[in-house]
Amino acid sequence: MNRALARQALAEFVGTAFLVAAVVGSGIAAQRLSPHDVGLELLENTIATAAALVAIIFAVGAVSGAHLNPVVTLVDRAFGGLRTRAAALYIAAQFAGGTAGAVVANTMFGLRAMALSTHHRATGPHLFGEAVATFGLVLVVFGVVRAGRGPVVPFAVGAYIAAAYWFTSSTSFANPAVTFARMLSNSFAGIAPTSVPGFVALELVGGALGAGCIAALYPRVRDDAGDVLLHHEEAA
């Protein structure tokens, strides 16, 4: 593995770890600070997660692109932005980082380092919500980039996740690595192991549909200066 790829994998590991620590940690804090008020707990969880996400993307984006999400990595690979080896390493780093983030969050709040969640979420509406949430995330990430507005991606993604926490029935996990990691915390942000396969499956479906929509909407890819980098119709 070359040095550049190692740095990118480290960025994905650290970034995903902090993202999960923010999601799980703020969920635990919200549950303790606002007991029996689910709406306020979700609001507190939302604000912390969205703010952390913006900061994390700024912090590691210049190194790895701050995917922090296997779906984003798979879509980028499908579009030719990554080689297969790099994509596989990104995804491994994301899952490892997510697990580390859950352990850190649990430990910070005096809980067992790993405790499987008992929060069952895999109802039909929740699963549909995950497909919608992930479709929208892919649309925002790649739509903003392909419109040549790369510098605003952190804000766009943070704003979308903040909104999707509320407008989707699943509260927008939209990330297989984060979904897996949240299984390891029996707290407000957790998800029961039996709910994980359904969530991940629908996240992949939503991501694939989002990728198809992006390909249709943006046959011309532009850089931040507005110059056309690739015309997909010609490339095909």
Image (cartoon, grey):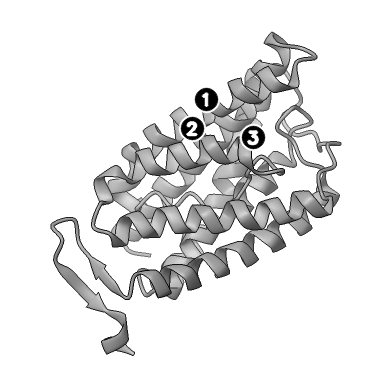
The amino acid marked with disc number 2 is: Ala
Residue drawn at the location 59% of the way across and 32% of the way down: 23
Mark nearest the camera among 1 and 3 is: 1
Q: In this image, 205 relative to 117: left or right?
A: left
The amino acid marked with disc number 3 is: Ala
Q: In this image, 94 relative to 157: left or right?
A: right
| Location of mark 3 (residue) | 102
Q: Residues within 10 Å of mark 2 (few under 14, many from 20)?
A: many
Q: What element carries label 1?
A: helix
Residue drawn at the location 29% of the way across and 43% of the way down: 152
Q: What percent of the width, then of the height, locates residue 70? A: 54, 58
Q: What element carries label 3?
A: helix
| Location of mark 1 (residue) | 47
| Location of mark 2 (residue) | 50
Q: What percent of the width, then of the height, locates residue 204? A: 62, 64
Please tell me in which quadrant of the rendered image residue 127 appears: bottom right
Quadrant in the picture for the N terminus: bottom left
Which disc number belongs to residue 31? Answer: none
Q: How crowded is mark 1: few (under 14 residues within 10 Å), some or many (20 or more)?
A: some
Residue drawn at the location 34% of the way across and 46% of the way down: 153
Quadrant in the picture for the C terminus: bottom left
- Above or below, comparing residue 63 to residue 218 in the picture: above
Q: Distance between the residues labelled 3 and 2?
A: 17 Å
Label whose residue precedes the other's in the sequence (3 or 2): 2
Q: In this image, 17 relative to 218: left or right?
A: right
Query: Considering depth in this image, is 209 or 175 the residue closer to the camera?
Result: 209
Query: Considering depth in this image, is 49 or 160 the residue closer to the camera?
Result: 160
